DNA sequence: CGGGTAGCAGTACGGCTGTATGGTAATCGG
DNA sequence: CCGATTACCATACAGCCGTACTGCTACCCG
């Protein structure tokens, strides 16, 4: 066997460049040649690792949401370790999804660009559904936990409550990116939405 | 003066074809040649009415949100004429924004496609901000009205409450389009979010 | 009833796209 | 140390893109 390279590392490198490009220039700005330049490699090498653009897109999206999921999970671990109320932990982890600083803004743009494309690309739509389902399950579990702890009044449908909370997160993210991070207290608004479910926790 | 044509009608015709194309194929599917074919005219004629693609985009977006605003306003008129509680009127008018049937789905896709593009196009961003501001002002006014009628408890920040409601609408729309109109009772979820503000109305 | 202008179509052009292909360099097993 | 195999680059290619330009046609005004 000849000349070995770390495939995972290469793919991650390409995905990183992809995210930078997508965040900065939007979906239309991501082409093989631009991507190659951004990643500091040749177009041919990208082809070597990704058979087609569809495959590349799907990998990049999957990678992006996976990374984000890990970030959220880390936040949850932190909060749980600190012994905070579940509502606070939930809020902290969801704020992670709002484009309130440069880093989250870039991540938001990646999500937004790929989700928009998912409307017309079944492969991406599948990834979007899966990642959305994961997030929904997580929030629903937190709500259920809240019920068990008496922070949420019994009888609420955890999944629907989770949907409402996640919808607010998504919609607030869109508002923040459009009107600027300082235009309104997005965290407070989200906090109030969460509090509307976790009534017992205040 | 020679051979006159109805500019407004032509532009509307082009904008209509633009919306069909954008809803069906996404932003990447809208090109001058495809648009001309969809509208049943020549590429040259589109150029005759729109100096560049930027101008066309901006017009099409503006036209789309204007039409939507009119639809919402009509709903409000209807509800007000029927003497419904403001919370109900609000809910009815906001449900108009959810992609629950084919027509609203197409409209949602147009909004989504153009809003995604607005992240990287200042001209579109301006239109998005303006239309978003209009909607926000409308919902905030309804909330204020609710305070005056005793349907909303005094002391709530109408604008922030409106932001929370609109965020839920937007986020729910994204969820609906991803998981299907029948996956969950989106109207009920939105209704509960509205009810969380209009506590006095129930 | 011409002259001129606006409506409209057709085509040509440079540039960028994603993909296919050929070649070179490097590194492994034997 | 050498052949096989993989990493990687460079270039070629067909196709679509947005725009510029040319020319024809139909109409209004004087």
Image (cartoon, coloured by chain):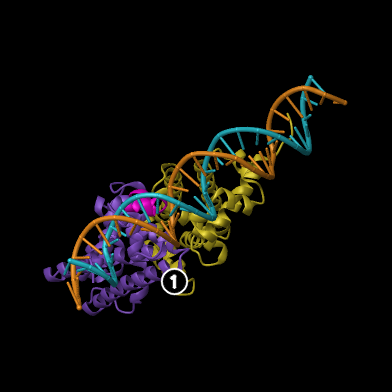
Chain colours: A purple, B yellow, C orange, D cyan
Where is residue A16 shown, x and y percent of the image?
27, 57
Tell me if residue B123 comes above or below residue B185 in the rendering: above
Does the magenta stretch mainly form a helix, a strand or a loop? helix
Residue A48 seen: yes
Tell me if residue B42 comes above or below residue C23 in the rendering: above
Q: At 26% from the left edge and 74% from the top edge, which residue is drawn?
A: A142
Looking at this view, is D24 or B200 the one in front? D24
Secondary-structure class at tag 1? helix
Q: At 37% from the left edge and 51% from the top edge, which residue is drawn?
A: A33
Residue on which the image places disc 1? B179
Task: In the displayed orientation, state which residue is furthest to the left.
Answer: A82
| Stretch of the chain drawn in magenta | A22-36
Q: At 38% from the left edge and 54% from the top edge, which residue is drawn?
A: A32
- Left or right: B84 as drawn, with respect to A118: right
Q: Residues within 10 Å of mark 1 (few under 14, many from 20)?
A: some
Looking at this view, is B193 or C29 the one in front? C29
Where is residue C23 shown, x and y percent of the image?
34, 56
**Number of numbered discs overlaid on the protein picture:** 1
Looking at this view, is A4 or A87 the one in front? A4
Where is residue A176 shown, x and y percent of the image?
33, 51
| Image quarter in which the N terminus of chain A is found | bottom left
Looking at this view, is B21 or A171 the one in front? B21
| Image quarter in which the C terminus of chain A is found | bottom left
- Left or right: A67 as drawn, with respect to A171: left
Chain letter belonging to callout 1: B
Q: At 21% from the left edge and 70% from the top edge, which residue is drawn?
A: A86
The answer to which quarter of the image holds residue C24 is: bottom left
Residue B200 seen: no
Residue A27 belongs to the span the image colors magenta: yes
Residue B35 belongs to the span the image colors magenta: no
Where is residue B53 shown, x and y percent of the image?
52, 43
């Amino acid at each position: 066997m000849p000349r070995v390279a770390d495939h995972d590392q290469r793919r991650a490198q390409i995905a990183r460049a992809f995210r930078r490009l997508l965040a900065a220039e939007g979906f239309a700005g991501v082409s093989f040649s631009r991507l190659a330049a951004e990643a500091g490699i040749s177009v041919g090498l990208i082809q070597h690792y990704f058979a087609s653009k569809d495959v590349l897109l799907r990998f990049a999206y999957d990678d992006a949401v996976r990374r984000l999921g890990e970030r959220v999970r880390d936040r949850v671990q932190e909060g749980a370790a600190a012994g905070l109320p579940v509502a606070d932990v939930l809020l902290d982890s969801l704020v992670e999804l709002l484009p309130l600083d440069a880093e989250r803004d870039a991540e938001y743009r990646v999500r937004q660009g790929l989700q928009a494309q998912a409307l017309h690309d079944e492969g991406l739509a599948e990834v979007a559904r899966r990642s959305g389902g994961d997030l929904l399950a997580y929030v629903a579990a937190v709500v259920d936990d809240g019920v068990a702890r008496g922070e949420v009044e019994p009888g609420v449908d955890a999944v629907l409550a989770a949907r409402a909370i996640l919808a607010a997160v998504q919609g607030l993210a869109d508002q923040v990116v459009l009107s600027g991070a300082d235009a309104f207290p997005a965290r407070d608004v989200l906090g109030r939405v969460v509090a509307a479910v976790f009534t017992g926790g205040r």
